[in-house]
């Protein structure tokens, strides 16, 4: 398992931008670039914070003012956690395993919290869905 601090010490800027944008569920690519730049510049000067509070402050300064009530660093922490733990990969594996155990006529109920998780679930459902023989087909 890679610790976030170790990952941040070596991750290339472009990869960090991708991780923050993709797993941090932000449409603000400029903010993702500002955060990645702040991390990379701080790292280059040997001052990358190794404590959560100091890292959150660095991200907050780089991101700027948020219109939402959440902490400005929340989605960056989420992005790092999702990436380092391969949470989306684990979700896909778990869903596939559940479908393998499902009996004919069985049901699966899934609750997701984030849009990105919902997209993974829906994509897998579409991939695995089957039409019953008695169901009409549109021509």
Image: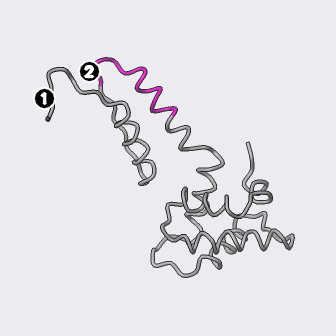
Residue with the mark numbered 1: 136
Q: Which part of the image, by quadrant, shows the C terminus? A: top left
Q: Which mark is first along the chain, 2 or 1?
A: 2
Would you place residue 135 above or below residue 117 in this image?
A: above
Residue 105 in the magenta stretch? The answer is yes
Residue at the top extreme, as displayed: 103
Residue at point 28% right, 27% down?
130
Q: Residue 90 versus residue 119: which sits nearer the camera?
A: 119
Instruction: Quickly name the residue at label 2.
Output: 105
98 on left or right of 130? right
Q: CA distance from mark 1 to mark 2?
A: 18 Å
- Check the image and name the residue furthest to the front: 139
Judge the density around disc 1: few (<14), some (14-19), many (≥20) Cα neighbours within 10 Å.
Answer: few
**Residue that lies at the very extreme toward the bottom in this rendered image:** 65
The location of residue 61, given as percent across then percent down, is: 65, 79
When the figure is inspected, residue 4 is found, relative to residue 64, above or below; the finding is above
Q: Quadrant of residue 32?
A: bottom right
Q: Of helix, strand and loop, which one carries label 2?
A: loop
> Which residue shows up at 54% across the image and 57% down it?
22
| Residue 96 in the figure: left or right of residue 18 | left
- Magenta segment's dominant SS is helix
- Find residue 51 and report its horizontal and vertical position in percent: 75, 64
Q: Percent position (x, y) of residue 93? A: 52, 32
Q: Which residues are magenta?
A: 93-106
Quarter of the image where one finds residue 40: bottom right
């Amino acid at each position: 398992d890679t610790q976030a601090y170790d990952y941040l010490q070596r991750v290339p800027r472009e990869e960090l931008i991708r991780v923050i944008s993709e797993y941090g569920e932000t449409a603000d690519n400029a903010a993702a670039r500002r955060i990645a730049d702040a991390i990379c510049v701080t790292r280059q000067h040997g001052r990358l914070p190794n404590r959560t509070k100091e890292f959150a402050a660095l991200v907050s300064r780089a991101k700027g003012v948020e219109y939402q009530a959440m902490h400005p660093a929340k989605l960056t922490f989420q992005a790092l956690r999702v990436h380092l733990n391969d949470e989306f990969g684990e979700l896909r594996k778990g869903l596939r395993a559940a479908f393998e155990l499902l009996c004919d006529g069985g049901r699966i109920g899934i609750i997701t919290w984030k849009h990105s998780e919902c997209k993974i679930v829906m994509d897998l459902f579409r991939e695995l869905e089957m039409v019953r023989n008695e169901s009409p087909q549109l021509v």
